[in-house]
Image (cartoon, rainbow, N blue to C red):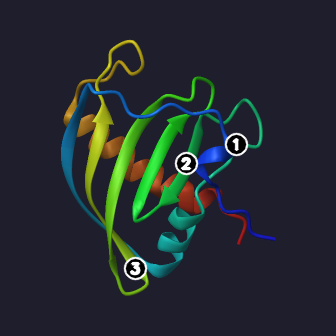
């Protein structure tokens, strides 16, 4: 049975008022897009992320604190998704990175991690 993560599956907090918006252009294939739409519910405390997809938006939260780190906006292109922008947490008490390029790299890697995390 495929589990699809929903916001109420975890104790989470909204993105704070301190954030930056980054431009993205990441096209996912159908299989990757399906994985993003499922999100991830951590299996154990070693997993650092809780992610859920709602209304063409992927929300990525730290699993231990529930802090929202990214809100990634997608547009649908048929059955595929294209990431077009991300709002990234800049509240230093919740997330210490301030390098936009590093965040784009991390987001790209996390999208791949979400795909790899799925049980196909």
The residue drawn where x is 49% and y is 28% is 67
Residue 55 in the image, given as x and y percentages of width and height = 43, 64
Do the residues bearing badges 3 and 2 touch, measured as CB atoms within 8 Å?
Answer: no
* Rendered image: mark on residue 51: 2
Q: How far apart are marks 1 and 2 (CA)?
A: 9 Å
Q: Distance between the residues labelled 3 and 2?
A: 18 Å
The answer to whether residue 109 is above or below residue 92 is: below
Residue at the bottom extreme? 78
Q: Is mark 1 on a helix, strand or loop?
A: loop
Q: In this view, does 67 lie to the left or right of 97?
A: right
Of 26 and 1, the residue lying toward us: 1
The answer to whether residue 117 is above or below residue 64 is: below
Mark 1 or mark 2, which has the lower sequence index?
1
Mark 3 or mark 2, which has the lower sequence index?
2
In which quadrant of the rendered image does the C terminus lie?
bottom right
Residue 46 in the image, given as x and y percentages of width and height = 70, 31
Q: Distance between the residues labelled 1 and 3?
A: 25 Å
Of 48 and 102, the residue lying toward us: 48
Residue at the top extreme? 93
Q: Is mark 2 on a helix, strand or loop?
A: strand
Residue beneath disc 1: 42
């Amino acid at each position: 049975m495929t589990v699809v993560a929903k916001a109420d599956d975890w104790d989470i907090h909204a993105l704070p008022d301190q954030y930056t918006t980054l431009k993205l252009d990441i096209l996912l294939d159908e299989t990757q897009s399906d994985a993003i739409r499922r999100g991830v519910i951590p299996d154990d405390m070693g997993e650092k992320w809780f992610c859920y997809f709602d209304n063409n938006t992927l929300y990525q939260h730290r699993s231990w604190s529930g802090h929202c780190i990214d809100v990634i906006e997608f547009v649908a292109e048929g059955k595929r998704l294209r990431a077009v922008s991300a709002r990234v947490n800049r509240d230093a008490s919740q997330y210490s990175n301030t390098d936009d390029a590093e965040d784009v790299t991390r987001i790209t890697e996390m999208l791949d991690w979400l795909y790899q995390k799925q049980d196909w």
